[in-house]
Amino acid sequence: MKSLMNQHTIYIVTTLFFFGCAGPAATPPENSPPQTTQSLRKDKPAGDSTVRHDVSVSAPTHEEIADMVVESIAPALPESAMIKEKFLRQEPSRMHERKRLQNFNNQLYIQPYRSATEPLDRENYAVIEDNGLKLAAEDPVSTFSIDVDTGSYSNVRRMLNEGRLPVRNAVRVEELINYFSYDYPVPEKSEQPFSVTTEIAPAPWNTNNLLLHIGLKGYEQQQDILPASNLVFLIDVSGSMHSEDKLVLLKKSLSLLIRRLRAQDRITLVVYAGASGVVLSPTPGNQQATILNALNNLSAGGSTNGAAGIRLAYQMAEQAYIKGGINRILLCTDGDFNVGTVSFEALMDLVAEKRKSGVSLSTFGFGRGNFNDALAEQLADRGNGSYSYIDSLREAQKVFAQEMSSSLMTIAKDVKIQIEFNSANVRSYRLIGYVNRQLAREDFNNDKVDAGEIGAGHTVTALYEVALVDGKQGLIDPLRYGKPEVKNGDQQELAFLKLRYKQPDGDTSQLISYPILKGAIRADLQKASERFLFSASVAAFGQQLRGGKYLAGFSYEQILQLARRGKGNDAQGYRSEFIQLVELARSLSSQVPPLVDVRD
């Protein structure tokens, strides 16, 4: 026992000697202030990004050092008091100044307070500038491609549910409008694959102007009689997909589609990360256990070589091509391509070239933080497909189950709209949304120019705000010189509407045209249809989120009133959810609630 105590004594003495005697004494400069405090800020460890703070504390005394060492090493030993006393008798210049100042020098690292930070946000959105007003006398023709994408709406919903207003470039107004179905007449046969509906009434946000509503409705196809499908699931399994709202949600989402497949369908599973590979060769759709097992065994890791995955997916789709069937790649990703071909234009050119094979490409976005919306939207555009953003399993149910026919089966391709406004009756107009779908006037008759596709049962809606010649002076002053010549006989026409489309397997477009007459104007907004009112409320909401440049003070409260009046039949609850989102946006905004009712 005595031997053990002696060992402890030697250990304590050695420790005290280290504190007191290791190194020369620090001699302060002549006439310097007393060194009673030292700045505690040691060099930070490598890779540490923590904020540092300068903190001054009193340096411990010679006796305090002895107490700390003895009490921390062997407070219970009998020799402790004796050792401490011996330590204190040592020369202060050796024990007090030397190591004390060295241990508590002015670069000591401390654990600081962390400043509040937001999560890193690297989401990518293409810049969008709203369509401006155009004078019918100077530029009477408007031409654009239709758009059935809905990704912007569900992405905006995700941001609002996170408790923040969306960034403006994330809001594409036409995708908000087209998220909802409207009760347009259904075409009875596929020779003309969609119906055309128009309606004109006062613009809710500016009753001096009119709102021209154009609606298309594709013929419907029951899921059980869809053509055989050759589907390639192209799944991003890179490290960036490792989260609940990405790969985990992706697996659950695709499972909803897999459970609806039939024996005549074929499923291929291709994955990509730093490299790409085939996880499941073309497999009959009724072998659901095999398909689900391959899907559920996927895990995330590595970099993202999206271009390699796209090439392999097209190769597999062409290998299993079904003539007269549905041949489509379903790209599921956060869009964070970072190795291989990462050039935006190069990826667009790759997909544009591959669509000539007869294989379409649709994109499905997942996740947040690094989501590349611009890439996902444009890839689908070039690939003759549609773009959806999956923010929840409920959205997956809508896209992969309820709207499976329209998501997979194209009934008309390269659909273009051109409208010529009659300058005798129309002073100015502006197209709401469709900013990146604009076409040159000559593109309308050029069958080589690509445009949007309509799926079975899809509805497509476009809105123009129109100012009449005999109405109140608008934002653009009339020209001082010159007056447009007007042909006799067209005084009753506001505009002339033309549409071009191709059959899914055709190369030559067909033309549909309709005059839009002044007599069709409904002077009272109260008499407008529910679809008119609701689509106008969605258009106003999208414009409000983008800054409301043309809304003339139309508020969130007025948007809510308009949406409630136009809600109509809402079997799935999507319109009720929209109203809740408007209420949420109102709460998140700094807009002062108005005291006036919605304009009639």
Image (cartoon, rainbow, N blue to C red):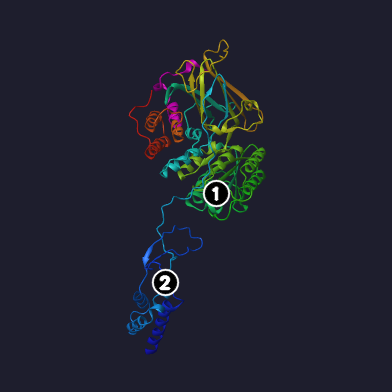
Q: Quick check: marks 2 and 1 in contact, CB under 8 Å? A: no
Q: Is residue 537 magenta?
A: yes
Q: Amino acid at mark 2?
A: Leu
- Residue at the image position 49 percent from the left and 51 percent from the top: 248
Picture quarter with the N terminus: bottom left
Q: Quadrant of residue 552?
A: top left
Residue 394 vs residue 233: left or right?
left
Picture quarter with the C terminus: top left
Q: Quadrant of residue 62?
A: bottom left
Q: Position of residue 395 (x, y in %)?
A: 47, 42
Q: Where 337 falls versus 421 (above or below)? A: below
Which residue is the site of mark 1? 288
Secondary element at tag 1? helix
For the residues labelled 2 and 1, the Cα–Cα distance comes to 73 Å
Of residues 250 and 430, which is closer to you in this image?
A: 430
Q: Is residue 203 magenta?
A: no
Q: Residue furthest bottom?
A: 2
Q: Which residues are magenta?
A: 516-539
